[in-house]
Structures are given as structure tokens and as C-alpha cells.
Amino acid sequence: MAAESVAVEVAAAAASAAGLKAVGAGLAVGLAGVGSGLGEMGIGAAAMGAVAENKDMFGLALLFTVLPETIVIFGLVVALLLMFQ
Amino acid sequence: MFQPESMSRLLIVASKQQLEPVITELYRMNIFHIDDYVEKGDGEWEGFRIGMPLAGADVTSAALVKIRSIASAFGISKDTVSDAERSSINVLKQRIEQDLPAIAEEVEKLLAKKTKYESMVKEYEQRIEALRPFIDAPAPLELLQGYDTISFIAGNVKSPVSLSVPCEIWEKQLKSGYFVILAVKNSDVSTVERELLDFQIQKIQIPTETGSASQVIHEYELKIEGLKKEIADLERQMGTIRDKHEFFLMSSEEFLSGDVEQAEAPLRFATSEHAFAVTGWVPTSKVTKVFENLDKACAGKVYVSELEVEDYNEMPPVEYHNPDFAHPTQLFMDLYSRPRYTEVDPTLLMAILFPIMFGLILGDVGYGVILLIMSMGLRSFVKGSEAGNQLITVLRNCSISSIIFGLAFSEIFGFSLPWQPIWLSRHINMGGAAHGAATEAAAHGMEASVEHVSHIPQLLVISIWIGILHITLGRIWGARNAAKMDHGHHRTLKIYANIGWILVMWGILVLIWSNFPIPMMPDFSQLPALVAGLNPAMIAGAVMLILGLVFIARENVLDLMEVPTIISHVLSYTRLIAVGLSSVAIAMVTNFIAIDMIISPQLKLLSPIGIILVIVGIVVFLFGHALNTALGILGGGLHPLRLHYVEFFTKFYRGGGKKYTPFGMIRKLTKQTD
């Protein structure tokens, strides 16, 4: 009886640990995505303006726009490590 | 390799009698990049002025303007004309003199007529608009004007009108408000107008027509119809002329624009009273050709010499010098900025690495095949556009790389192919998929735990290795560019700074390796401690780090702020795997929803509703994979591009080179000579 309940408890603890891992992974990607989005918002608008004025700016504008994107990649990597390691 | 085409600077001097043959010959060769002569400033030669255009330039320009206006009226361009045949120049010259004026006159006449008719149509349409409110008016239009004692006012109001003076009101309800026609005594007009302001009236002019409005509208509509027929007839006539003369017009446009360019070339030359001189750039491999051809064209009466170039920085125009397969990638280089003459041209490396990175991200046979078919299908759409063609070629290379990586990863639309992934797998444990794979692997006597079915940490480490090597190469090229392009003390500092960045990066790496064992990376943590619990690797790493920081600080102390970017830039390369895994995940989720959740339960128990659900499942499947293909192109294309632009180029690339634009033209529709 006692052994059985301990086994159930251990299983429940393992399940909740896995669940928390999944929640953590979700938060990592989601929050990092929100952050990147906020960062890219202003840059993207300004970059569009610059490209509209001068088409040669395209390369540089793209470069600046994608700069904050690294953050979401970090989030994604953290999530992957959480889920698969 | 990794260098732009080598250029030589030539000086051509001759007497003015040789001006025309020299220009014609240079134009024919199409390899001489003219340095425009500037009268003021450093480039000025005493006694030399900018030349005058050749005789006949104005006549040619006039003819060219005529042809271009006809072409724009017809909406034809060089690209729309078939270039199957070419006109001979003598015939063209003759026809330009004989036929062109007649054609131009006819087209002008037709165009003038067409514009006239079109403006008439517009006017009638405006009149119809003005008449429309009066369709239901109680009296014919001629009765609403022309009285000595009574005035009529018409307009739209917000609410029904009631006035303090005697008047006759006719109202019609509209969607919002009313349309009214008022008849008032002339003496009351000003009072009425003031009172009407309270009803927010928008006055409408009563049209000066006779008969009922609907009758008049009908008449105008008939007239418009007639005019439109006339216009269509004119367009047909113009179409016949266009079809007949299209080729002649475009080939003479080509011929004349070449002529005008040649006639105006002296504006870029330096001329004295009896002689002219011009400097320019020619690819070094073609210098002897220029010498020989000019000598022949002028029967030896020309002096050509190769000039010494002291400072190559920025001056020569830049032409790429790459093997054929790397040509499409030049598009990405021009998008960023053309390299300078003396710096490293990374096009070749990018041409190799870009498709590999794309394949790492979108390594899936199914998507690869779709993209390959797309690149073949799109080819005919971009006909004539060089950039479009280059882009399509890049897409084709990327899709082939995607197929190769797909075969290695054993992936097709998120399913696995009938073999185990070669070396590393990125199959995700979704819906227990990895458990199935593990069981299968166990059946084949291989490592059987779920952890061994996917190798995500290992893949991430590989992507980091790519980053480390890529960035190290960037810094090495940075040092090389500094050595070649900078001068004096600054040059030394810059070279050391680049070495410093490499030292800092590898120092940090050695420190990490000496403390933590990481898969697929050297492990120094087991080395015996030397002093104070520090092992030799730790000491070496610390020395490299500090030495590197000193080198960086010597060039610019503020650059030390940028040191953390070493880590973020290296880690940024993990996107190669992370973005790829997200596309694997989307594919697997699509398959799971479409097949496991919708289609297969229905197939077990077939019912009429079940069949509809199966169709829904198929739609979900197609939609999901279409979306993932689009995301794959975006993710697979933009991320490698960004890794090159942001993480790689910022280490060494300067850009801002002048484009090599040789004097001449590639003829499509005319023969070079007769």
C-alpha cells in the first residue's frame, strides 16, 4: 500500500517536472519573441522610411531590422535545450 | 580568387581628327570605363577643357526622342521585342531617314485624335454626373432657368426645408438627407440663401440643358458609346502600326541611343584646340587588346599608355572576378554594397556557404523538390531581368542543397525516409514519434534510447562550430584588409586589434573547455592542475583573453564595450539548427493534426461524414505544408543572409566600391557593324 502510493507520488512529481519544463520552454520562446518584436517594431518602421527615400539602403536597412532577432533565437535555443536535453 | 578583377589605368591621347574613330572603337569593344574629366579641382590639366559633342548629336537626339515617345505610347520596350533577328545598321539608317517621319506623323495624328476623344468622353461623363440628381425633377430642365422674376436653387440638405418667405419646394429623399429644388422670388434670394445655411445646404448648379434629365443622360450615353467605339478603332489602328514597326522602332532605338552616347562621349574627355586626352580603366587582361585595336582603328595615329597607379584605395571601378557558379551570389553582394577594389571579395565563399546554410535549415527532400520545381517554373517569368534570374539560380542551388541535407537527415515533409539519418538526426519526439523510432532502431541492434534518436545538442554544437570558424575567418580577413588598405600607425593597430578579437574569442573558448566538458568540442577539464588548482589550458585561455583585450583596447578603448558581442554573435549561429527545427516541428504538427487526428480515425470506420472529414484533413495537410514551404523560403533565405551580413561582414567588410560600367553596349537587336 505504502510503496504503491510512493510510486504514484514519484510519477506525479516526474510528470509535473516535465510539465514545468514545457511551460519554461514556452515562456522562453514567447517572451523572447515579444521582446524581439518590440525591438524590431521601431527599427522596421524607420528602415522602411529610409528605403523609401533611397533604395540603396535596402541591405543596411535589412541588417538593422533583423538585429534584435537574435534574442528570439536565443529563446528558441533555450527552449530546445530544455525540451531535448 | 576573393579579389575583384584586376584593373589597369590607361591614357589615350590623339589629335582631334582621331576623335571619332577612337570613340567608335572604344564603344565597340565595350571594356573601357571612362574616368570623367573634371575641369576644376585636382584632376585638371592645364590648357584642357571638356570637349564638345560630335557633329550631328542634336539630330540623332531628336530622332531618338521621337522614337522613345512612340514606344512609350505603344507600351513597348526592348525586352518585349523578340531578339531572334538583328537589323543591319545601313538599312536602319536608311529607314530612319525615310520611314520614321511618316510613322511618327501618323502615330502623332492618331494619338492626338485619341486624346481628343478621351477628353470628350470625360466631359460627357461629368455632365451626366451633374444631371443625375435631376432625373426625377418635376419639370424639364429648360423650365428651371431663364426667368426675369423667379430664381431656382437646387442642392442637398440634411433635413426637410421650411422657409420664412413664400416659395415653391420640391423634395426628394436620398440615402442621407434630401435633394431639393426651390423656386423663389429674385428679391428673396439672399434671405433664402442665408436661411438655407441652417439646413447645411450643398448647392448644385442646375445644368443648362433642354428636356428631361433622363432623356439628356441617355443622349450623352449614346455619344460616349460612339466615342468609345472610335477610340477602340484608333487603338486597333495603332496596334497594326505597332505590330508592323515594333522591331524597327526598338532596333533603331538601340542604334540611336548608342549613337547619342558616342556623340556625347567627348563631354567626358579632356580636349585642347587640336588634341584630346582621356583616362579610364580596363581589365588588366584586356590591355593589349585595347592597344592593338586602337592602333588599328587610327592607323597608328594614337598614343595609348598604361599609367602607374600609386594609390589603389577606392579609385578603380570594381568588377567581380568569380567562377561562373558564384555569379548569382553577386546579387547579394550588390544588395549590401559592392566591395572596394583592394579588399577581400567574399562572394565565392558566400556562394558556397549560403546554400549549405539554407540546406541545414530546410533539410527536407519534399520541400527541396517543391522549391526546385518552383525555381524551374519561375524562370520564364523573370525573362530579361538579370537580378530575377540570379535570384532564381540561387533558389535552385539552395533547393538542391536542401534535398541533399534532407536525404542525410532522412526527412520528407516531416516524415522520415525509409532509412536512419546519416550521422545526426533532428527527428523530434512528437506524439511519441521518437519512441517508435527508438524501438525500430533497437530492432536493428542500434542504440535504443529516445535521447539517441535526436541529436539536438550535438547539432547545436555543430552550428556553434560553424560560427566560430566563420567569425575567425572574418577577423583574419579583417586583418588582411587593414594590412592592404590602411596606412601608418593606424594600420598596425588595426591588424593587432583583429588578432586581439580572435585571441579573445579563442581565449574564452579555451576557458570554457577547461572548465566544462562539451560534446564534440575539446575537453581540457581533465588536465592535471599546474598552479593553484589551475590547469595549463585555463592559464593559456586567460593569457589569450587578456592579451586580446589589450590589443583591442590599443586601437580603441570603447571597442571593449563590444566584447560581449563575441558570445552573442557565435551563439547567433545556433539559428541554423533552431530555425530548422522549428520548420521540422511545424511539418510534424501538420502531419499529426491532419493524419493522426483527422484522417486515420475516420478511415477505420468509413461514414459519409467521415469522408468529408478526410477531405478536411487533406486540406489541412496541404495548407500546413504550403505555409511551411513559404516560411522555409523566408527563414532559410533570410537567416543565412543575416548571418553573413551581420555576423560575418561586420568583421572585415568595408564596401562602397564603384561599379565598373564600360563605355559601350551589349547589342540585342542590331548588328555591330556591316
Image: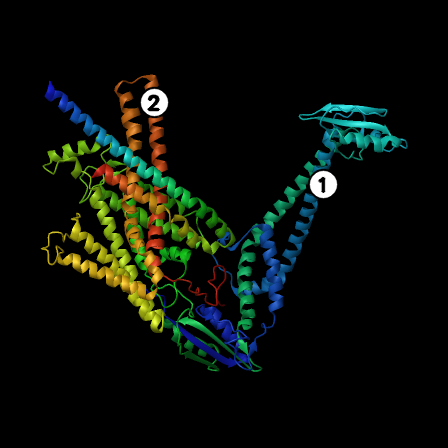
Residue B366 visible from this viewpoint: no
The one of B413 and B487 positioned closer to us in this rendering: B487
Q: Is residue B535 left or right of residue B133?
A: left
State the residue at coordinates (65%, 57%).
Answer: B102
Residue displayed at 17% across by 51% down: B515
Callouts 1 and 2 close, C-beta under 8 Å: no
Amino acid under disc 1: Glu
Q: Quadrant of residue B173?
A: top right
The circle drawn on residue B613 is: 2
Q: Give coordinates of residue B646: x percent, y percent.
A: 35, 54
User: Which label sits on residue B664?
Assistant: none
Q: Which mark is residue B123?
A: 1
Residue A14: x percent and y percent? Answer: 19, 29
Neighbour tally class for label 2: few under 14, some 14-19, many 20 plus, Cα within 10 Å: some
The chain to which mark 1 is attached is B
Residue B617 vertical position relative to residue A46 in the rendered view, above or below: above
Q: Nearer the viewer, residue B259 or B41?
A: B41
Dot 2 falls on which chain? Answer: B
Query: Considering the numbered disc 1 on the image, is that residue within a helix, a strand or a loop?
Result: helix
Kind of residue at disc 2: Leu
In the depicted view, which residue is nearer to us: B520 or B242? B520
Q: Is residue B581 above or below residue B601?
A: below
Discs 1 and 2 lie in a common subunit:
yes
Q: In the image, what residue occupies the spot 30% across and 49% down?
A: B572
Residue B36 is situated, as x and y percent measured from the top left of the image, at: 51, 71
The image shows residue B368, relative to residue B589, as above or below, that is below
Q: Quadrant of residue B477?
A: bottom left
Using the rendered image of the protein, determine whether residue B51 is visible from the camera's viewpoint.
yes
Is B110 left, or right, of B323 in this rendering? Answer: right
Q: Residue furthest front?
A: B532
Decide which of tag 1 and tag 2 comes sooner along the chain. 1
